[in-house]
Image: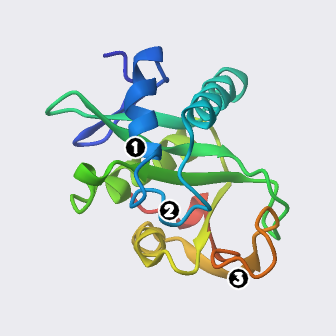
Amino acid sequence: MNHLFYSERLGFRQWRPGDLPHFMEMNADEEVMEFFPSVLKPEETSDLLARMANHQIEHGYTFFAVDELETSEFIGFIGVIDCKIDLDCTPCPEIGWRLKRSAWGKGFATEGARACLKYGFDALGFDKVCSFTPDLNVRSEHVMKKLGMKKQGHFKHPKLEKDHPLEQHVLYLIHQDEFDL
């Protein structure tokens, strides 16, 4: 399947055109997109996939397409991109994940994010990586804690309207010397 690297149960790879219909379905799921301002329209998902593929070409990393190895099924993305907002810790890469609902509750987000941190620190030479999520997204914050990331505080996301229910975010950070596989 041409995976770039693996965890115990997951393969991480570049995006392919065949991923688009599955990615569109995932991004149209209201539960998957609960902590985003809205679900994504098909053209928005297509644009996002193109941006992630281009980020891979330009930087050597991205939010990678992720397959469950046992089934070879595309389950979403986990990876690292350049953080696009100005935070106390930037510039630095941002780790993130989005999985389809059928992949929830299996530990894939934590396992995959741990593999991506290892890849980022070992293969790409990152010295630190951040992650953030709306305060309401306790599941993603729990993953950050399980990764050994340290809470840096809260901020208002600059791309969300003032007083938007998701405006308040929590910020986490991990340095290479703090990462313990």
- Mark 1, mark 3: which one is toward the viewer? 1
The quadrant of the image that shows the N terminus is top left
Q: Are marks 2 and 3 in contact (CB under 8 Å)?
A: no
Is residue 2 shown above or below 61?
A: above
Judging by the rendered image, the residue that carries numbered circle 1 is 26
Nearer-N-terminus badge (1/3): 1
Nearer-N-terminus badge (2/1): 1
Task: Tell me the crowding category of disc 3: few under 14, some 14 to 19, or many 20 or more residues within 10 angstroms, Cα based.
Answer: some
Task: Tell me the crowding category of disc 2: few under 14, some 14 to 19, or many 20 or more residues within 10 angstroms, Cα based.
Answer: some
Q: Residue at x 53, y 52 (%)?
A: 39
The Cα–Cα distance between marks 2 and 3, rounded to whole angstroms, is 22 Å
The Cα–Cα distance between marks 1 and 3, rounded to whole angstroms, is 28 Å
- Judge left or right: residue 134 versus residue 83: left
Q: Residue at x 62, y 26 (%)?
A: 56
Which secondary structure, mark 2? loop
Q: Nearer the viewer, residue 103 or 123?
A: 103
Judging by the rendered image, the residue that carries numbered circle 2 is 179
Quarter of the image where one finds residue 21:
top left
Three-letter code for the amino acid on which mark 2 is drawn: Phe
Q: Is residue 117 visible?
A: yes
- Residue 123 x/y as whole percent: 55, 35
Q: How is the image coloured?
A: rainbow
Three-letter code for the amino acid on which mark 3 is drawn: His
Q: Nearer the viewer, residue 55 or 75?
A: 75
- Residue 119 x/y as whole percent: 49, 40
Q: Residue at x 56, y 45 (%)?
A: 40
- Residue 120 x/y as whole percent: 56, 43
Is residue 94 shown above or below 65?
A: below
Judging by the rendered image, the residue that carries numbered circle 3 is 154
